[in-house]
Amino acid sequence: MRIGIDFDNTIVSYDTLFHKVARERNLVPPQIPVNKLAVRDHLRRIGQEDHWTAMQGYVYGARMDEALAYDGVIEFMHHAASAGHQLFIVSHKTRKPFLGPEYDLHAAARAWIERHILWEGKALLPAENIFFELTKQEKLNRIEACGCDTFIDDLPEILLAAEFPQSTHRLLFDPEAHHEMAIAKGLQVFRNWQQLSEQFSER
């Protein structure tokens, strides 16, 4: 099986890091939950959208190595690779931030993968199976070109896109239950990587 996985907010969790950076910059009060969306929503509420935009570039660039993998995702990838499945990372992100210093966000993400998606010191997928596309349409095209049998993403808009490959099984990663209507729209939803590992081990 060829398993494609999105990167940001699917493999990598930014909740702790965004909260940490926002507190370092005195942009949020300490009582704001340790959650990326809570930080974003607070800054939007107080009219500080530009601070949020600039902070994204800083986090995804200069501070990327401090981001954490979701609990269980490395184990899932290890078990999948050990079972003979072929893994792909297919994501979309701009190469440079919209505001602030011009970090190479693709290079930062690839460096994170090289340092963190390992098992016993060995990479869990080859570099040629890692793709960062500039647009959502290019991401959809890449999923099809990779021939993914299954694709895992945190965005329903990707999985429900008209251009999404019809032969690819769609799995929505929704750890905080933000997309309750996804099941009604035909998506298979899972809340954590341990749950998905159990499903795959039963096959």
Image (cartoon, rainbow, N blue to C red):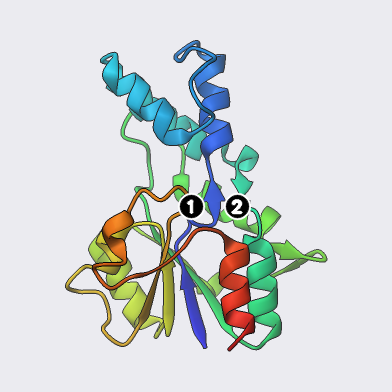
3 horizontally vs 85: left or right: left
Please name the residue shown 50% across and 10% down the image.
Answer: 26
Could you say whether the residue bearing mark 2 is in a helix, strand or loop? loop
Other residues around mark 1 within 10 Å, as few (<14) / some (14–19) / many (≥20) = some
Q: In percent of the image, x 50 and y 58: which residue is there? A: 191
Q: Which residue is mark 2?
A: 70
Residue lying at the far left of the rendered structure: 162
The C terminus appears in which quarter of the rendering?
bottom right
Q: Would you say residue 72 is visible in this rendering?
A: yes
Q: In the rendered structure, which disc, 1 or 2, sits on the residue that comes first in sequence?
A: 2
Residue furthest right as drawn: 120
Q: Considering the numbered disc 1 on the image, is that residue within a helix, a strand or a loop?
A: loop
| Image spot of residue 28 (x, y percent) | 46, 15
Distance between the alpha carbons at the discs numbered 1 and 2: 10 Å
| Mark 1 or 2, closer to the camera | 1
User: Is 13 placed left or right of 80 in the picture?
Assistant: left
